[in-house]
């Protein structure tokens, strides 16, 4: 059993989280599973063994009917639910989206699922519900009317939040997770900027309940810098949650271990989070690769956790005065060199 990963001196929760889906059976679009699927609730103790303090789950993984059982298993393993999320992408009914489907009855089904997910979030004791834009988008132009789709997103989010506010006040907050493509060719809410724009159009009575769940790899798939994406969310006071992982260039979504591809940028990201006193939960959204044997399925979480803690501690030691001085001297390249020095411990 790995000791729990702890982010020293972090404001708010210092433990780290991961999704139950991170420990999947290894299927990809070109081949089936390479490992036996582990029942979702059984993955909670595995996340604990890998050093996590929080688990995250979709409604299709831990449905409302399993919530009490999941909670007991979590409690027995010193775990809490970091966030819960309705899947608007797995069921074939949502093949063309939920909130932005052209079919009114499918939009209604999406809303019904989202409301049930709010109740399950409450049962699980999570403070955050995430909406990932999964299949909200289009593969062919004019298949949907973009303006109608946007209005439907606004209406859908308003309705979910109004339901939640009536029942639970401000106890549950909503974090929208952007992604530019995959599974759709073009996804609505592709970037942090789009999510912030959408939030600005929500009903002012519930707007404060909405924020962003940026994922480092998703920014990269969009060809964007994830540090600026996170800074933008922070500036708007909307960084409600975060998904950390790595991505090897602009290609299919890889969900690689955090710290694997761009450690220097990850170090800078942690400096930004520390300076902003980010008080939400830090979670991984990684994928155990299909080449890993069942006995090593937790490696990806242990590698991510070690990288995170090592980089976090290096980030604490970054001398902010040096950066301020170099900025004042207009020495951007020297800042990169100073970060490298911190990274390599020289
Ligand atoms: C896909 C993702 C999603 C979201 C999840 C949370 C399956 O690229 O990142 O993981 O994180 O749906 O809402
Ligand atoms: Mg994610």
Image: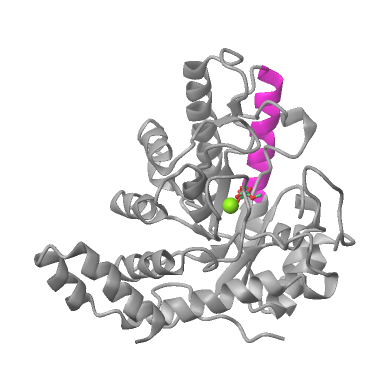
The residue shown at (81%, 51%) is 27
Image side of residue 163 versus residue 263, left or right: right
Quadrant of the snapshot with the N terminus: bottom right
Between residues 130 and 232, which one lies in front from this camera angle?
A: 232
In the displayed structure, 288 sits above or below 59; it is below
Image side of residue 142 versus residue 207, left or right: right
Question: Is residue 219 visible in this depiction of the protein?
Answer: yes
Image side of residue 98 versus residue 326, left or right: right
In the displayed structure, 76 sits above or below 141; it is below
Is residue 33 on the magenta stretch? no
Question: What percent of the width, then of the height, locates residue 110?
Answer: 67, 32
Quadrant of the snapshot with the C terminus: bottom left
In the displayed structure, 248 sits above or below 309; it is above
Question: Is residue 69 visible in this depiction of the protein?
Answer: no
- Residue 47 is drawn in which quadrant? bottom right
Image side of residue 57 versus residue 264, left or right: right
- Residue at the farthest left position: 329
The residue shown at (67%, 79%) is 78
Question: What percent of the width, then of the height, locates residue 126?
Answer: 58, 60
The residue shown at (67%, 69%) is 300
How many marks overall?
0
Question: What percent of the width, then of the height, locates residue 184?
Answer: 63, 32
Residue bounds of the magenta highlight: 103-119
Q: Main secondary structure of the magenta part?
A: helix
The residue shown at (83%, 75%) is 295
Is residue 109 on the magenta stretch? yes
- Residue 338 is drawn in which quadrant? bottom left
């Amino acid at each position: 059993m790995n000791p729990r990963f702890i982010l020293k001196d972090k404001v708010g929760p210092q433990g780290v989280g991961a999704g139950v889906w991170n420990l999947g059976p290894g299927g990809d679009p070109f081949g089936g599973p390479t490992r036996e699927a582990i029942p979702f609730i059984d993955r909670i103790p595995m996340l604990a063994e890998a050093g996590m303090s929080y688990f995250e789950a979709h409604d299709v993984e831990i449905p409302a009917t399993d919530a009490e059982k999941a909670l007991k298993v979590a409690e027995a393993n010193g775990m809490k639910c970091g966030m819960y999320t309705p899947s608007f992408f797995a069921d074939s009914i949502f093949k063309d989206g939920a909130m932005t489907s052209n079919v009114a009855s499918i939009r209604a089904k999406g809303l019904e699922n989202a409301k049930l997910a709010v109740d399950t979030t409450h049962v699980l004791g999570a403070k955050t519900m995430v909406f990932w834009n999964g299949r909200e988008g289009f593969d062919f132009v004019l298949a949907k009317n973009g303006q109608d789709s946007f209005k439907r997103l606004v209406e859908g989010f308003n309705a979910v939040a109004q339901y939640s506010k009536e029942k639970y006040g401000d106890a549950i907050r909503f974090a929208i997770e952007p992604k530019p493509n995959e599974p759709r060719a073009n996804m609505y809410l592709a970037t942090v900027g789009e999510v912030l724009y959408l939030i600005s159009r929500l009903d002012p009575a519930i707007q404060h309940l909405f924020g962003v769940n940026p994922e480092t790899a998703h920014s990269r798939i969009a060809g964007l810098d994830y540090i600026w994406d996170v800074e933008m969310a922070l500036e708007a006071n909307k960084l409600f949650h975060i998904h950390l992982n790595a991505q090897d260039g602009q290609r299919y979504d890889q969900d690689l271990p955090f710290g694997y591809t761009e450690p220097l940028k990850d170090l800078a990201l942690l400096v930004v989070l520390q300076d902003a006193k980010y008080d939400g939960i830090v979670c991984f959204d990684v994928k155990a690769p299909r080449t890993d044997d069942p006995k090593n399925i937790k490696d990806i979480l242990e590698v991510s956790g070690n990288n995170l803690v090592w980089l976090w501690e290096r980030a604490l030691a970054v001398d902010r005065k040096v950066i301020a001085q170099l900025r004042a001297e207009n020495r951007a390249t020297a800042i990169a060199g100073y970060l490298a020095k911190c990274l390599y411990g020289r």
